[in-house]
Amino acid sequence: MNLPIFTIIVPCYNEEEVLEVTIDQLTAKLSELIKQNLVSEKSKVLFVDDGSKDRTWHLIYKASLNNEMVKGLKLSRNAGHQNALLAGLFSAKEASDCMVTIDADLQDDIHAINEMVKKYNEGYEVIYGVRSSRESDTFFKRFTAEGFYKLMDKLGVKLVFNHADFRLMSKRAVDELEHFAESNMFLRGIVPLIGFNSTSVCYERRERLAGETKYPLKKMLAFAFDGITSFSVTPIRFVMLIGCLSFFVSLLFGLYFLTLKLFGNTELGWTSLITSIWLIGGLQLIALGLVGEYIGKIYKETKRRPKYIVDVDLFNLPVSRKLINMEGADYEPISETRKLSENN
């Protein structure tokens, strides 16, 4: 039996406080999987530096020099969590049979990876890591997160409930994922669209080992709104419905005021007038903003700009000690353009 070549992909953004522990735990987990004959000895852990401003890349590179299991991929700038995941998947897929994505803070249970690999060996091509409960979350976070999943379901977007970006995908699934060419990649909604044989593995989410969350409330709201507008036109239809209702209500009020005029009772206050003006004005601004959001997405899609730019790729290039000063974080950048020219 040929064991699958397996890659653990870890997006990192300013994770120097937790990264050394993460590297130790993930390499230990990969060694365990190899000893249990679940994955090939050629398996790797790929850390994707998403334009970090701290020593994250230095720690990744240092680990890659000391441990052949560790590989690094450095993006030229911060491209966002979803694009960092894509960069890791697309870089690793040619040399991997299956890949799992997991955040660097290791709040997702790495022991669930064993069950994921077993499910893959059973024939599943997409295995979702699903939280069994949200008891560790605050009431606000639990309420908003579960409300988001329910709202997306009402809008017709089929997400895996309580699943984030902790998942295993086969090479074939990642190949199909690469065919999705849109700029606004909301992976939690796109991956289920692939449609291959899938299943779920439940786990308990843990506290962050160190450092601060990279998803404060502002980013969470922006992420949720981006997911909604990327997958559904229901909000625009809802605004149109409100507009129609407002039109019919205005007709009723028009008839009401006309009746008052006919009977000579026209001494009315300004409250109803001012309220209606502000109400209609607010609805118009909301409608314009929502339509503008969709137009903005269309504008971004037409530009066809790259989702990310790779600065250094240690997964597909041999490691060279000349690239980094071990006393600091200096390195000689290797862009994709330069890499191609060197190969030619």
Image: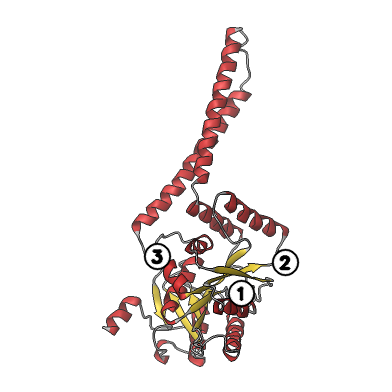
Picture residue at 63% right of the left edge, 19% below the top: 269
Check disc 2 and report the residue beneath it. 136
The picture quadrant where one finds residue 16 is bottom right
Foreground mark, 3 or 2, reads 3
Check disc 3 and report the residue beneath it. 179
Q: Is residue 273 left or right of residue 75?
A: right
**First in sequence: mark 1 vs mark 2:** 1
Q: Is residue 277 left or right of residue 292?
A: right
SS state under label 2: loop
Foreground mark, 1 or 2, reads 2
341 or 154: which is nearer to us?
154
User: Which numbered marker is on residue 169?
Assistant: none
Q: Position of residue 291 (x, y in %)?
A: 46, 44
SS state under label 3: loop
90 or 337: which is nearer to us?
90
CA separation, marks 3 and 1? 30 Å
**First in sequence: mark 3 vs mark 1:** 1
Kindly indicate whether the residue at mark 2 contacts the one at mark 3 (C-beta within 8 angstroms): no
Foreground mark, 3 or 1, reads 3
Check disc 1 and report the residue beneath it. 105
Label 3: few (<14), some (14–19) or many (≥20) C-alpha neighbours in 10 Å? few
